[in-house]
Amino acid sequence: MMYSSRRKPVLYFKEDRRFWSGKCTVYKLFGLCVVLVLVSLLWLQLSCTGDMSRVVVDDGRLPHQPCPLERQASAADDPSWGPHKLALLIPFRERFEELLVFVPFMHTFLNNKKILHKIFVINQMDHYRFNRASLINVGYTESGNDTDYIAMHDVDLLPLNEALDYGFPEEGPFHVASPELHPLYHYKTYVGGILLLTKQHYHMCNGMSNRFWGWGREDDEFYRRLRTAGLQLFRPSGIKTGYQTFRHIHDPAWRKRDQKRVAAQKQVEMHSLETYYCVLFVCCIPR
């Protein structure tokens, strides 16, 4: 029997080189990141210039909606806002629910009082015990030269009385959350919750002690630093709302406090502003 020597044709398929085919590579991820950045910039541009479908005004031009930075510049030019600028420092870790309430609330509260401000969220990202004082030292260092006073502010404490003063504390440190107004702490040497200081006064105290890990007692030690630096502490007067002056949004049943005591926490460490840290991301919310 004769067999045909003709071979069957072999079909060669052209390799599919489409972008999404095959394995995920570094180049594909880079291209995707570039696309996302371009889309974000386009969205930001549209949000600043306003909706292009709005009705044209009488002079034939679209009404201009200023960007947040333009609004900040116009407020800085308004003399009624004053010459000073506040750096609102929030020592933070794992309290996103409170932060989502705090930031827009305080942004509106300070704007209504015509106080130029920046909000700094200083997040502790390691797995060690919380070190509130060290985070405040970092916030002071990173607050920039365009702010001249700071507010050491708890993220779970919201001011409810519009008469509370967040202005420049020229005469001395101003304790907004004074013992007769704070909903929880009423002893006379308490300076926690909300404390305003000029940067000069904070430097005179050499910042806060970095040796307090866990919850509490760093404020009590800072009161001693205020006394050592010869600074007079001021508190609100004429506030008649009592313990209803602030809203405390911390739930102790949901978030347990780390209240362990360490013997070394009782010591006074004066070299506090020499905090070693690495800036991974700075969240700064301008006015």
Image: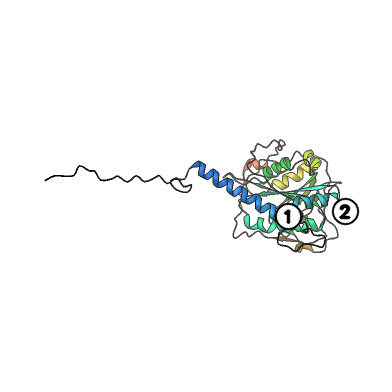
Q: Which of the two residues, 175 or 11, is positioned nearer the viewer here?
A: 11
Q: Residues within 10 Å of mark 1 (few under 14, many from 20)?
A: some
Disc 1, SS: helix
Q: Which of the two residues, 8 or 213, is positioned nearer the viewer here?
A: 8
Q: Quadrant of residue 124?
A: top right
Q: Residues within 10 Å of mark 2 (few under 14, many from 20)?
A: few
Single out the mark in the foreground, 1 or 2.
Answer: 1
Disc 2, SS: helix
Q: Which of the two residues, 162 or 84, is positioned nearer the viewer here?
A: 84
At x 71%, y 57%, the residue is 104
Q: Which of the two residues, 51 or 239, is positioned nearer the viewer here?
A: 51
Specify the amino acid type for callout 2.
Answer: Ser
Q: Tell me if I can see residue 208 in this picture.
A: no
Specify the amino acid type for callout 1.
Answer: Thr
151 left or right, relative to 250: right
Label 1 sits on residue: 49
Q: Which mark is residue 80?
A: 2
- Residue 251, given in percent of the width and then of the height, sits at 63, 60
At x 83%, y 43%, the residue is 231
Q: Is residue 82 above or below residue 275?
A: below
